[in-house]
Image (cartoon, rainbow, N blue to C red):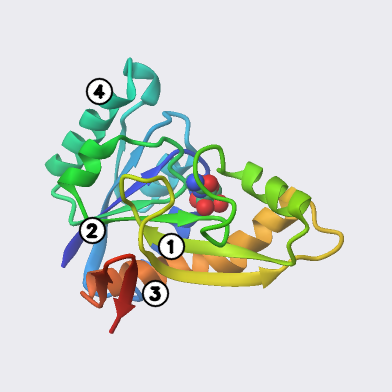
């Protein structure tokens, strides 16, 4: 059974999707053992506590730079004996120390179809604003491995939806979450825990 640690910063609806999947028995060979938040006020912390999951705050504001903050998060994850680390709405870009420690064991959910609308500055609602401004007809979500380059690690799973003429950033965000993120994130987590995802260069192969 793998120990799953979930990193959060806000509402935690992706964390909730993972908890719900776990309760339905859909996370095979893994268990969410801790939630770490960069923000002491994140509602995600409530969701963890309500479900009996250890919740911990490693506040970004308490560290002078990203290097010392990354060290603190890495130490917390080592202490928790995390086998898989899931970035679920985690809004801080950590430096390469963490990738060196947990290479191939960290995955992120991004609210767009990578390699579009990703990288520095593309997070939360900003992603959906940029998608609507661009005029693309499809968007979606991506689950990928975390590497040194922001939002550029091997892709595990993607799901697309059509954009409607009357979409706003808010309606699009809601649909991408419900139809894409909350569906593919638990699936990818379970596949990882079952040892069914292999990294082959820039690609992944699912068995
Ligand atoms: C989600 O849409 C997630 O994909 C996104 O923030 C939202 C968090 O919602 N993450 C990023 O933009 C990171 N680049 P949640 O806290 O309700 O899961």
> Is ligand 1 within 8 Å of the beta carbon of the residue shown at mark 4?
no
Residue beneath disc 2: 104
The quadrant in which residue 121 appears is top right
What secondary structure is found at the residue carrying circle 4?
A: helix
Q: Answer with mark 3 or mark 4, whichever residue precedes in sequence.
A: 3
Q: Residue 24, which numbered label? A: 3
The CA distance from mark 2 to mark 3 is 26 Å
In the rendered structure, are the residues bearing label 4 and label 1 in contact, judged by CB atoms less than 8 Å apart? Answer: no
> Could you tell me which residue is drawn at 21 percent across and 30 percent down?
71
> Is ligand 1 within 8 Å of the beta carbon of the residue shown at mark 1?
no
Which is nearer the eye, 23 or 140?
140
Residue beneath disc 4: 68
Picture layout, residue 185 above or below residue 28: above
Image x and y of residue 103, in percent: 20, 53
> Could you tell me which residue is drawn at 39 percent across and 32 percent down?
38
Give left or right: position of 61 versus 175.
left
The CA distance from mark 3 to mark 4 is 38 Å
Residue beneath disc 1: 143
What secondary structure is found at the residue carrying circle 1?
A: strand
Image x and y of residue 161, in percent: 66, 71
The CA distance from mark 1 to mark 2 is 13 Å
Picture layout, residue 155 above or below residue 170: below
Q: Residue 22, which numbered label? A: none
Nearer the observer: mark 3 or 4; the answer is 4
The quadrant in which residue 49 appears is top left
Give left or right: position of 30 versus 172.
left
Q: Answer with mark 4 or mark 1, whichever residue precedes in sequence.
A: 4
Q: Quadrant of the N terminus?
A: bottom left
The CA distance from mark 3 to mark 1 is 21 Å
């Amino acid at each position: 059974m793998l120990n799953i640690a979930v990193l959060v910063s806000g509402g935690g609806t992706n964390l909730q999707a993972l908890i719900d999947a776990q309760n339905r028995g859909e996370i095979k060979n893994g268990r969410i053992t801790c939630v770490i938040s960069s923000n002491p006020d994140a509602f995600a912390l409530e969701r963890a506590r309500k479900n009996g999951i250890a919740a911990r705050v490693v506040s970004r504001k308490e560290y002078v730079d990203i290097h010392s903050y990354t060290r603190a998060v890495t130490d917390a994850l080592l202490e928790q004996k995390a086998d898989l680390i899931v970035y679920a709405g985690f809004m801080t870009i950590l430096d390469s120390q963490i990738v060196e420690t947990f290479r191939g064991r960290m995955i992120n959910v991004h609210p767009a179809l990578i390699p579009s609308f990703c990288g520095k500055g593309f997070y939360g609602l900003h992603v959906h604003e940029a998608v609507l401004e661009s005029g693309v007809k499809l968007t979606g979500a991506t689950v990928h491995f975390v590497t040194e380059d922001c939002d550029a690690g091997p892709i595990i799973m993607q799901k697309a939806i059509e954009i409607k003429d009357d979409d706003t950033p808010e309606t699009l965000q809601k649909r991408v979450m419900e139809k894409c993120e909350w569906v593919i994130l638990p699936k990818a987590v379970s596949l990882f825990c079952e040892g069914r995802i292999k990294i082959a260069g820039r690609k992944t192969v699912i068995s």
